[in-house]
């Protein structure tokens, strides 16, 4: 694969576009069909920003990746650091520039640009100061993950209905980020991760608190749906909660790798629950 493309992690960019579309659909349901221009512009800009963020992440991690990921474009020598940095900044500028143009042309409101711009600033803070900070870093990654859905909702001009999805995604992502740190504890001795700072049992206890709050709120979110939509949502969200709780239980039992994977799978099921709730 071309190193300029590889460093952007194209699969992640595509998943970002899917998440943006889900956030927009949750906000307005089938009416999204009439907002094709806004959705296309928003998804394209989000993909550019995420691509730039991924390239920037590899630029900051280039020394550590010599040992951890030697096959990546920078440590393998297929892409020079200066070129990677220019590429990352160009992608970020392209994404934000597209949103600014959409705002100026009245195709989009100012909120998508504000969310994306804020996300880029938070990404910079994470890479330069918070990556090895433990819980603050976990929370920031979770916030960025959830913000994709809120950003999608903002493309429609009415992000309110996507707030539940944003909130639940942030809480579940906090739990998963902590479990991932437990999984990587042996290799993260030079980082002040939460498990390294307060111990695995306490870290997993905090993950459990975040996930249990998400589970409780997931049923409160059902009030926003009616009839068959509510029934479909409840069935799927109950399944999602069960999968994520089982994943956390596996982490408690010592299998953090399987646990974090189940947490991710449960989050996808929860996303499907919101799609059903908005579409029925």
Image (cartoon, rainbow, N blue to C red):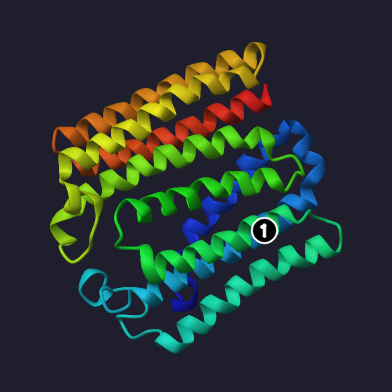
Q: Residue at x 79, y 55 (%)?
A: 108
Q: Quadrant of the N terminus?
A: bottom left
Left or right: 244, with 17 as reference point:
left
Residue 29 versus residue 8 in the image, above or below:
above
Whether residue 254 appears in this view of the structure is yes
> What is the x, y in percent for residue 68?
22, 69
Residue 257 figure quarter: top left
Residue 63 versus residue 127 in the image, above or below:
below
Left or right: 133, with 157 as reference point:
left
Left or right: 208, with 195 as reference point:
right
Total residue callouts: 1
Residue 214 figure quarter: top left
Q: Residue at x 18, y 33 (%)?
A: 252
How would you rate the neighbour count of disc 1 (Cα within 10 Å): few for under 14, some for 14-19, many for 20 or more?
some
Which residue was labeled with disc 1? 114
Q: Residue furthest top?
A: 227
> What is the x, y in percent for residue 13?
53, 58
Q: Secondary structure at mark 1?
A: helix
Residue 159 figure quarter: top right
> What is the x, y in percent for residue 100?
75, 66
Q: Residue at x 33, y 42 (%)?
A: 176
Q: Residue at x 57, y 29 (%)?
A: 274
Residue 13 versus residue 246 in the image, above or below:
below
Q: Quadrant of the C terminus?
A: top right
Most foreground residue, 10 or 253:
253
Q: Residue furthest right?
A: 105
Whether residue 7 appears in this view of the structure is no
């Amino acid at each position: 694969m071309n190193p300029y493309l590889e460093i952007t992690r194209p699969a992640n960019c595509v998943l970002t576009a899917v998440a943006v579309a889900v956030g927009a659909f949750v906000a307005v349901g089938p009416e999204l069909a009439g907002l094709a221009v806004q959705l296309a512009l928003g998804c394209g800009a989000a993909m550019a920003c995420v691509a730039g963020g991924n390239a920037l992440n590899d630029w900051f991690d280039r020394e550590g990746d010599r040992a951890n990921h030697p096959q990546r474009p920078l440590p393998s020598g297929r892409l020079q650091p200066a070129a990677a940095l220019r590429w990352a900044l160009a992608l970020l500028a392209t994404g934000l520039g597209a949103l600014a143009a959409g705002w100026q042309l009245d195709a989009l409101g100012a909120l998508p640009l504000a969310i994306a711009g804020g996300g880029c600033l938070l990404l910079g803070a994470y890479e330069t100061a918070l990556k090895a900070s433990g819980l603050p870093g976990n929370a920031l990654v979770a916030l960025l993950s959830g913000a994709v859905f809120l950003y999608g909702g903002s493309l429609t001009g009415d992000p309110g209905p996507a707030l539940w999805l944003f909130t639940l995604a942030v809480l579940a992502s906090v739990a998963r980020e902590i479990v991932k740190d437990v999984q990587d504890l042996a290799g993260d001795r030079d980082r002040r991760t939460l498990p390294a700072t307060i111990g695995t049992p306490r870290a997993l206890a905090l993950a459990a608190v975040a996930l249990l709050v998400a589970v409780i709120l997931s049923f409160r979110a059902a009030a926003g749906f009616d009839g068959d939509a509510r029934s479909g949502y409840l069935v799927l969200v109950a399944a999602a909660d069960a999968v994520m709780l089982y994943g956390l239980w596996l982490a408690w039992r010592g299998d953090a790798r399987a646990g974090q994977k189940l947490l991710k799978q449960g989050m996808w099921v929860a996303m499907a629950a919101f799609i059903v709730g908005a579409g029925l």
